[in-house]
Amino acid sequence: MPTPPPSSSALPAWMTPRNLLWASVGMALTTMALKTMAWYITGSVGLLSDAMESVVNLASAMFGVTMVTLAAQPADDNHPYGHHKAEYFSSAFEGMLIFVAAGAILWTAIERLLAPQPLEQVGWGLALSVFSSLLNGGLAWVMLRASRQHRSIALEADARHLFTDVWTSAGVVLGLGAVALTGWNWLDPVVAIGVALNILREGAHLIWRSSQGLMDEAVEPDVRDTIQQTLTTFLHQHNASTTPSGCVRFDHITTRMAGQRRFVDLHMHIPGHWTLSHAAELRGQVEQALMAAVPGLRTTIELLPCNVEAYLDPVAAPESHP
């Protein structure tokens, strides 16, 4: 899978997930027309499978627009943590559509394999397929880069699906070229079967990613490292300047992702003689440090005296340490 360049530079303001998914809708309509025309003039089942995947692209992009719009809605009484997980439904839906398309491709290809047919006007079919693949590849590259900057799984899913479409088209082109060179018409459905198996793999990957997000998967390893480093740096600075005893400490650090939003929960232990105002001031400083290190991070910090331990396991009895 192609990897986009690092997203260190800011994207243009119009490159929001919603706008890019609308661009994907338009691209799906364009490539669907081109690939259907290529299949019509050649009779290639490989090109037919390519055109069928464009239909999936269209449906998934439209569903993605709906879910991204829903995910952007602010929190309300029924959804106090927001609607960010809606993007996972888009990714899972796209994965399931890929499975449906792959099944249809396999069915058609096996029928053609049992009864091979000659192809016509292969040159025009190849040209139309290559042109549509270039369009899809260019848009997918932009979308994948934007998905990393926006942390949008719906955008990433659509981008990876478009890249799958590019590889599908490349396989079809190779199959048509092999048929033209050898005259072996059975190569066309064999390539279509290979294409179907490839996109099944991508569909399984998307569904797995979505399931992990819905089950509150931890944030990325590099983000976890950033959180830990930020807390360690803050701890060293604070204890060195104000608390020689080193009583201030952090534990029970847990993280999760919900679409574009990241969350961290932790316990901060402080000296028991501190005033509530002093403790709240320090907690605010920790929250500001974490949000500066990880933009968009939502932090929940529970304050505890130094000699008190909190246990997350409900069967474990709480215990105080003198």
Image: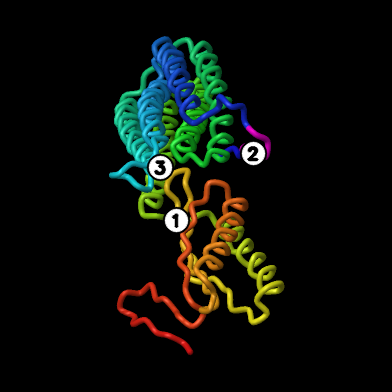
Is residue 134 visible in the rendered structure shown here? Answer: yes
Distance, label 3 to label 2, CA atoms, is 22 Å
> As rendered, which of 40 and 233 lies closer to the eye?
233
Instruction: Residue 126: say if magenta.
Output: no
Residue 249: quadrant of the picture: bottom right
Q: Which mark is residue 256?
A: 1
Residue at which label 3 appears: 84
Find residue 30 and report its horizontal and vertical position in percent: 46, 15
* Label 1 crowd (10 A; few <14 / some 14-19 / many >=20): some
Residue at 31% x, 24% y is 115
Whichever of labels 3 and 2 marks the residue nearer the N terminus, that label is: 2
Query: Identity of the amino acid at label 3?
Result: His
Point out the stretch of residues depicted in magenta: 4-10
Query: Identity of the amino acid at label 1?
Result: Arg
Whichever of labels 3 and 1 marks the residue nearer the N terminus, that label is: 3
Residue at which label 2 appears: 7
Find residue 212 and report its horizontal and vertical position in percent: 40, 52
Does 35 appear above or below 255? Answer: above
> As rendered, which of 174 and 150 lies closer to the eye?
150
Find residue 283 and report its horizontal and vertical position in percent: 54, 63
Instruction: Residue 9: say if magenta.
Output: yes
